[in-house]
Image (cartoon, coloured by chain):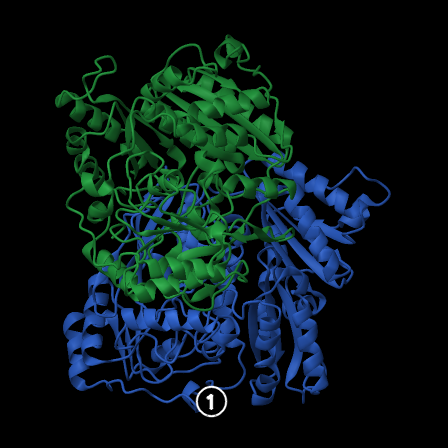
Chain colours: A blue, B green
Amino acid sequence: MVPGSLRTLLAGCGATVVRPILLRHAGHSLRSNCSSKLVLLSRHYSSGGAPRLTADANPYVKRADFKRLSVDDISYFKSILSAQEILEAGDEENLEFYNEDWMRKYRGQSRLVLRPRSTENVSKILSYCNEQKIAVVPQGGNTGLVGGSVPVFDEVVLSTSQLNKVRHFDEVSGILKCDAGLILENADQFLAEKGHIFPLDLGAKGSCQVGGLVATNAGGLRLLRYGSLHGSVLGLEVVLPNGEIVSSMDALRKDNTGYDIKQLFIGSEGTLGVITGVSILCPPRPLAFNVCYLGVDSYETVQKVFTKARSELGEVLSAFEFMDASSQKLTKHHLKNVPSPLEDEFPFYILIETSGSNKEHDDAKLETFLENAMNEELVLDGIIAQDETDFRNIWQWREFIPEASTAGGGVYKYDVSLPLKDLYSLVEAANEELDKKGLMSMEDSSKPVITSIGYGHLGDGNLHLNVAVRGYCKEVEAALEPFVYEYVASKNGSISAEHGLGFQKKRYISYSKSEPEIRIMKALRRQFDPNGILNPYKYL
Amino acid sequence: MVPGSLRTLLAGCGATVVRPILLRHAGHSLRSNCSSKLVLLSRHYSSGGAPRLTADANPYVKRADFKRLSVDDISYFKSILSAQEILEAGDEENLEFYNEDWMRKYRGQSRLVLRPRSTENVSKILSYCNEQKIAVVPQGGNTGLVGGSVPVFDEVVLSTSQLNKVRHFDEVSGILKCDAGLILENADQFLAEKGHIFPLDLGAKGSCQVGGLVATNAGGLRLLRYGSLHGSVLGLEVVLPNGEIVSSMDALRKDNTGYDIKQLFIGSEGTLGVITGVSILCPPRPLAFNVCYLGVDSYETVQKVFTKARSELGEVLSAFEFMDASSQKLTKHHLKNVPSPLEDEFPFYILIETSGSNKEHDDAKLETFLENAMNEELVLDGIIAQDETDFRNIWQWREFIPEASTAGGGVYKYDVSLPLKDLYSLVEAANEELDKKGLMSMEDSSKPVITSIGYGHLGDGNLHLNVAVRGYCKEVEAALEPFVYEYVASKNGSISAEHGLGFQKKRYISYSKSEPEIRIMKALRRQFDPNGILNPYKYL
């Protein structure tokens, strides 16, 4: 990495800060290459053979009374779909991909994957399954982290991966209409050529699909700037469990005619209907990006730097991520070919991104902010990206953390919302708990836990607690659950900030939602899916 | 107004633009004084006595089989509420306020207004009304424009006006928790003192209430910058028709645990439950504001200036309003004490507001933008506010339009979303229709229509079509409805961008929503309110 950290450059003066070279956007995402590679690589990290069957690992879950697939059923699907739209028993390697989740923690037993190429075919499939009481798991890019998109038993997998076209883009309004299976990175590349940006970004962008993002109400790295999908999704095309197609794809930016029913599908994790089309508002693409990486002495200082950044960087602040020392040590251990941004080690690190319409103005704002933060001794050392390579490298030290967490064998991931002041205390409490039970050691490979780390989107009050393990085991799970959920509930937090409920958190929703809320949700699910064929054993 | 329009200042040069004096925010809303006055004044404009009873003017609506209030019912309410929480028959002047809408177009016949001071009392009232099958109209500030918040027959009015406290504000996250009846202006003044801003602004801010804004999913003047309430509302406290209190007030910025049911209440216009508390994300208050008022030659140019503004002003653009010549002529006729911003007349006018964190940067962006727009001959003339008085005056030429529209006797208001290219064509089509039927004349007072004008939030694709009339009459209504709705539907627009459905548009929802969508909505309403006691005769 470029020599000359902020500390050196600012030594003895209050005026000179290294001038960052701002990165003009050249028609593609600045981080696109690395992130898609990360996702592909991840499959090779897990140790040993296939993960245990979810049904075996969780014997309390019993198969419900859904119809088992018959020869007639397969014949019916073959009569309405082309050969490219069906994967069946015999094609084990491919079936495996759809049965296993990204973390290799959950494994289903589906013998049929349908990959329809049109909304009409989705409709025919669901209509038939509903009549025949065949259970269905809708699946997007299968990058979820709570086991929500893979089967538990023999559910049919309904993949949106072949519904992957851009339908329409309006350059004046910035409204993109696309199929649900369009991969985020492809959507963003398309938008970049038009001078716009997808209002959401995340590490799995090379695999995750727009429809899956909406179905799980993904948050990601740009929420601080562009807000949640509840604000930016303008319309959806959804196939209901009975096969009926409901579309609000023509919706404009404002529409106050009746209940905003599309909102129910945002974050419904495939339990109310299958999203086949998305209409979403995409802001103008910023012309200038900056990123800096800072070392600070405590979590308290992290919060102070955040308040300062929000006030002084104002409308150009686009990301504020924090990482603890353990997360960066673990990253250092596994991210061999990317130099560490800072030579010294610090208790906490901060990544700040700015993006705006005027290079000079953004530079000036960031310089002034960093100068003040150094002079006030909030920031101990830091570095600003000087070119596109730096920009990517710095982001990798944040985006590689999930990979580094699984590299030792596996990871227990908790994604919670907490009031800012309490945010990091959960990591400390979890470490204490794991220590107390003698389950954790960086060196001693007889201990199941390697380390427990904390990082996340501070601007959104969103903490990722990752417990990196040498393998999945009941002792660690028993130490963490319901401990983590109880801790979060005691601080009025949410047990799932952005990852959703899926299979993992189905039983824990009452830590974040009240009895009347859960009752309303169950009634809604029954209303939309009276036969309960969509994504059973999960969510509620 | 300050002399020296842009045209004069820019004559013969491409470099010198008058330097705007940016307005630092001094702990109160820049437009607060005028807007609250406008709302109070509005009551005095209408000609003649009380408006016709809604029931008489719309004989097709029949009273449903709700219980008529008995002496026992009144006694019950008196047993649970204090004297200050009840207005009953005998207090005619006060009852009138709750029975009549802001436009004096709708008039109900309620003989009982309840103004509970606690959520618990709202709960007791609804529980009783639900058991007894007594119809209830929830009412906020009663500033709605579609007759949604006033009774049609003898429904009990449940006013939130005495639920008006700030509950909590978190200075780090910017999350405000307040009662539903808090007046928008009061909320914004409270936030100003904390360096934050309410993410929504509108002309009726002196009267409208936060809960009412949420219940009607109000859009207003800051949507372009801060997005819709579906994104910024984080939690709600709602009393269901059966009296049950459902709260998500503790919710943090991100929470993916189950369906986001609060979204259903946003824009439900009091048909699913009564909102009693709101938790909302309030951004840091910009430190610098600019406003300019420009004259252009055509609607086509308005669109070009918008595209240019969005690109060059980027993240500091906070409002882009357009107004046609007729709207400004009508305003000139009634807004006697505020000088016209520009001496000459133009076919279209544009108001642009910027707000940001750095005065110098914002100035520079606006100057460069205007200089280019003048040199490219997009903008024919314009003026930039030089001080706070200018700032208020310019905004008045936009915000006074609704008042000017009613000043001649009454107004038919249509608030629609249309694709940008088609936005203004509706005004032309409506004018043609009214002309063809011989109903319109500025001078001839025997014609019912004075003029028909168009203006609105261009950045949101939102047009306000106001047909200013000398009095309400069936001929004009027949010329406009369903003509306007059919026109909007033919362009795939929305018949209500932000005003909602209320009483006025209940019968026209099918112009904007499909049969399956309407069926889902009706099922939702039945699920939440099986006895149909909340806001009957409206919405769906």
Number of numbered discs on residues: 1
Compare residues B328 and A275 and report the one nearer the observer: B328
At a point 25% along the width and 44% down the height, the residue shown is B505
Compare residues B463 and A459 and report the one nearer the observer: B463
Check the picture and name the quadrant holding the N terminus of chain A: bottom right
Q: Could you tell me residue A163's position as x and y percent?
A: 29, 61
Q: Could you tell me residue A393's position as x and y percent?
A: 62, 56
Left or right of A405 on screen, residue A241: left
Q: Quadrant of residue A18?
A: top right
Q: Could you tell me residue A3's position as x and y percent?
A: 74, 50
At a point 14% along the width and 20% down the height, the residue shown is B438
Left or right of B135 on screen, residue A296: right
Amino acid carrying label 1: it is Ala
Is B240 situated above or below B435?
below
Whether residue A82 is visible, yes or no, is: no
At a point 47% along the width and 85% down the height, the residue shown is A51
* Disc 1 target residue: A57
Q: Quadrant of residue A288?
A: top right
Whether residue B509 is visible, yes or no, is: yes
At a point 26% along the width and 84% down the height, the residue shown is A66
Instruction: Name the chain letter of the residue that bears numbered label 1.
Output: A
